[in-house]
Image (cartoon, grey):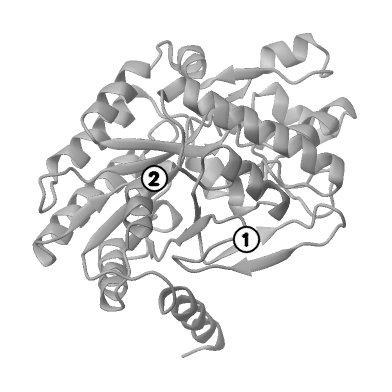
Amino acid sequence: MTPQSLKERGLWLYSNLRGWRTRRKLVVFESDDWGAIRMPSRSAYNALLTAGIRVDRSPYDRLDCLENRSDFDALMNVIDAHRDANGRPAVFTFNTILGNPDFDAIERDDFQRFHHQHLWDSYQHYHGESMADSWRQAMEQGLIRPQFHGREHLNVPRWMSDLRHERLETRIAFQYRFYGLTTSTSSPRQRDYLAAFWAENPDEVEDARSRLKAGLDLFGQTFGFGSKTFIPCNYTFPDQLRMTLADSGVRLIQAQRGQYVPAGDRPEGRVRRYYTGMKSPEGLLYSVRNVSFEPFESQNVDWLASTLRGVQEAFAVGKPAIVSTHRVNYVSGMDRVHAARSVRLLDELLENIRRLWPSVEFLSSDDLLTQMESS
């Protein structure tokens, strides 16, 4: 084994040999970023490249975009086709962004004030139809379970400040209605604007707290129930905001093995390691993703084999298989072939999971929370 692979194995063991266990074969699909616009169009992508912004270096910039009805329906058809031992579909936890910048309104205000565009309005603006009916139908059928990811997938104060100060690349990207550039910002520590809750001083902590509260309230207004779980944008979240989550009804933080914790009162932060069943001082539980199904990352990986191996390893140590599978895998606005491949691979993955583990149970993240709290 190489030193890097030994380190990876050690981190996997740390997060999977401790904490909550079960003898049941539980599979949880966690899918981030639904509702965020990312790259608005292929023409915007090409224009940004022509302007010298290297969006071709990031697979998210090359492939990720706001889902359309066709994307949504294709994924729902696959989820609905595969049922677990209890007859339940392979439910996806949709970690949802509640909206996007209203670029036109911000420009009219000469970049002096941020304007939010609600999720349903973003669909209307970019695709000519609100998809609220599709979401509600999928929720009623048990195909998706929305949970909170952020009000925007955007560090609003950092972005707005750089726009006001006419930071060149940020202004150019804004012209093409793009905020996701991964080059640099005015902060020496943040190379993009995507970590919505990255706070570098006490004032930024309070601003992040305000946006967190507003986002959780908006989630409840949008879906008719509160989010019991949460995953921070870019896996970055200050400790000072955990009580705000608890006070708002969140009881579990979805995590990867390590998440970045900004200090909030000094420049440097730290990476903290978690395991499923770990508790914060505020009483918040953590669940940790231990399986990856991310075909967008590489076409040279056998994603079917590697994901099934991850599920097997999770079950072998008595852990639920918590599968990371981002929205970018399933959207076709930038690359139809890529999206079709991911949907086909998902179909094969679910078929094999059902074949290999007939007693499998598909749960959403808040269902997993219920199981963890009751045992």
Q: In this view, does 49 lie to the left or right of 347?
A: right
Q: Give the Cα distance between marks 1 and 2.
A: 35 Å
Question: Can you say whether 159 is above or below 329 in the image?
Answer: above
Q: Which residue is drawn at 39% across and 45% down?
A: 329
Residue 340, which numbered label? Answer: none
Quarter of the image for residue 145 reads: top left
Query: Picture coordinates of residue 223 (x, y %)?
Result: 41, 24
- Residue 26 as seen in the image, left or right of residue 373: left
Residue sitting at 42 percent across and 41 percent down? 327
Q: In the picture shown, does residue 218 fall above or below 267?
A: above
- The answer to whether residue 40 shows anywhere in this view is no
Q: Which residue lies furthest to the bottom in this view?
A: 1
Type of amino acid under label 1 = Pro
Reading the chain from its start, which is encountered first: label 1 or label 2? 1
The one nearer the camera, 54 or 247, is: 247
- Residue count near mark 1 (Cα–Cα under 10 Å), binned few <14, some 14–19, many ≥20: few
Q: Residue 281 carries which label?
A: 1
Q: What element carries label 2?
A: helix
Task: Return the residue nearer the eye: 228 or 234.
Answer: 228
Residue 7 locus on image (x, y percent): 54, 83
Please state which amino acid type lies under the numbered disc 2: Asn
Q: What element carries label 1?
A: loop
Q: Mark 2 points at which residue?
A: 329
Of badges 1 and 2, nearer the viewer stands 1
Decide if residue 290 is in sight here: yes
